[in-house]
Amino acid sequence: MKLQMQPERWQCAITSFAMVLDLPVAELIRRVGHGGSKIIFPDLPEPKNRRGHNIYELVRIATNCGYAVTPIPLQPAIAKGDDLHDSLVIGNDFDNWTYFTNQLMCSCGVIECSGPGGYHLVAYDHGRIFDPRGYEFPYSRELCESKNLYTYCLWRMDRIEL
């Protein structure tokens, strides 16, 4: 995997997918049909006011490129209605982190993160993180969190036959 820089602050998702798909981000933007720049929430600050890219429109492109995309949430849960505060997490913290980390070490894909800056996506390849803000580093929970990357869902991307 080659590190690519996100052209705009709101293009972390499409750039992360571009890295995994081994496509220039400009080509993936062409295939999706937009750069995510449209302002749809004018009351929010940059870049949260932008449309950006929904992960499912990127999953669709990845599938068309011959990839199966499997979400692996860090804390899978059963929720009572829409109230996530009243949810029942499946498994325990240690087992969930172990499974998450093992998947990250033996595959490639993208990881959804949250932090003080909000939503962010990074690419990963067998334990190496490729942050479209321009950073590449070996994965560890502690190192990610020191960079304000609080991971919550890994999207494993595996080649399939079409």
Image (spheres, rainbow, N blue to C red):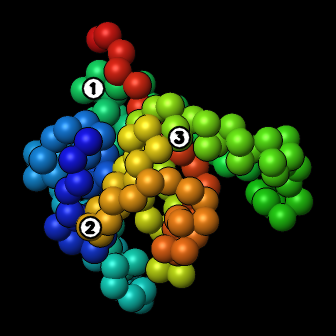
Q: Quadrant of the N terminus?
A: top left
Mark found first going from the N terminus, 2 or 3: 3
Q: Residue at x 21, y 71 (%)?
A: 8
Residue labelled with disc 2: 134
| Residue type, mark 2 in image | Gly
Q: Is residue 14 left or right of residue 153?
A: left
Q: In the rendered image of this protein, does residue 109 appear above or below residue 147?
A: above
Where is residue 119 drawn, in percent x and y?
Answer: 48, 68
Where is residue 50 drawn, in percent x and y?
Answer: 32, 73
| Residue type, mark 3 in image | Leu
Q: Secondary structure at mark 1?
A: helix
Marks 2 and 1: CB-CB under 8 Å? Answer: no
Spot the residue most to the top.
161
Mark found first going from the N terminus, 3 or 1: 1
Residue labelled with disc 3: 104
Task: Name the mark nearer the viewer: 3 or 1.
Answer: 3
Q: CA distance from mark 3 to mark 1?
A: 23 Å
Question: Is residue 48 at least partly visible in the picture?
Answer: yes
Q: Nearer the viewer, residue 58 or 158?
A: 158
Q: Residue at x 17, y 67 (%)?
A: 7
Q: In the rendered image of this protein, does residue 67 appear above or below residue 123?
A: above
Residue labelled with disc 1: 64
Q: Nearer the viewer, residue 141 or 87?
A: 141
Residue 4: numbered disc: none
Q: Secondary structure at mark 3?
A: helix
Q: Secondary structure at mark 2?
A: loop
| Residue type, mark 1 in image | Asn
Q: Is residue 138 left or right of residue 36?
A: right
Q: CA distance from mark 2 to mark 3?
A: 20 Å
